[in-house]
Amino acid sequence: MDQALREHLATVDRLVGISCLTDGAEQIFANAVLEAGGQLLVVVPADGHRENLPPSARQDYDALVRRAFDVVSLRFGEPTAEAYRAAARHMLERADQLVAVWDRRSADTAGGPVDVIREAIRRRIPVKVIWPSRPAVPSR
């Protein structure tokens, strides 16, 4: 996945990655954007989003937030399904393309890959799906 993601990002002019920095694929994506010389915009779905991440993902989350050129916090008190769907909509409103790094483990989650890909298609935003060679192991 890393190689395919990096190869794709190398083709993007004026690279700006937009992410909620959830654990797994989103943090891999954010790191790849920065390593490719791009900028990072972080969308925080709700208060408590960081605490909702597995403890093992919080240090990387903090490091990526510090490297972001902007952090947008949505006005949700708790990280609910509604908050994650709103974050996905917010990201798509700013996106020229959706790069979906789908690890096959979050297909039915709110604001997860299926929801986001469907919404991008509805909005006529080009979608590039990058599949890992094997599913990511949940860190939870």
Image (cartoon, grey):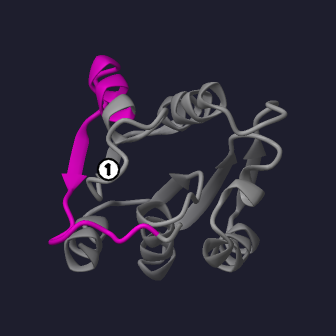
Instruction: Looking at the picture, tell me which residue is in the foreground, 17 or 47.
Output: 47
Instruction: Looking at the picture, tell me which residue is in the foreground, 105 or 131.
Output: 105
At mark 1, the secondary structure is: strand
- The type of residue carrying mark 1 is Ala
**Residue 69 falls left or right of residue 138:** right
**Which residue is located at x 72 percent, y 67 percent?**
65
Residue lying at the far left of the rendered structure: 133
Please provide the residue range marked out in magenta.
116-138
**Residue 3 falls left or right of residue 84:** left
Measuring from the top left, give residue 97's x and y in whole percent.
34, 42
Residue under label 1: 100
Taking the magenta stretch, the answer to whether it contains residue 95 is no
Instruction: Looking at the picture, tell me which residue is in the foreground, 133 or 28.
Output: 133
**Which residue is located at x 28 percent, y 23 percent?**
124
Above or below residue 140? Residue 130 is above
Above or below residue 17? Residue 68 is below
Classify the position of the N terminus by image quarter.
Answer: bottom left
Above or below residue 113? Residue 75 is above
The answer to which image quadrant residue 118 occupies is top left
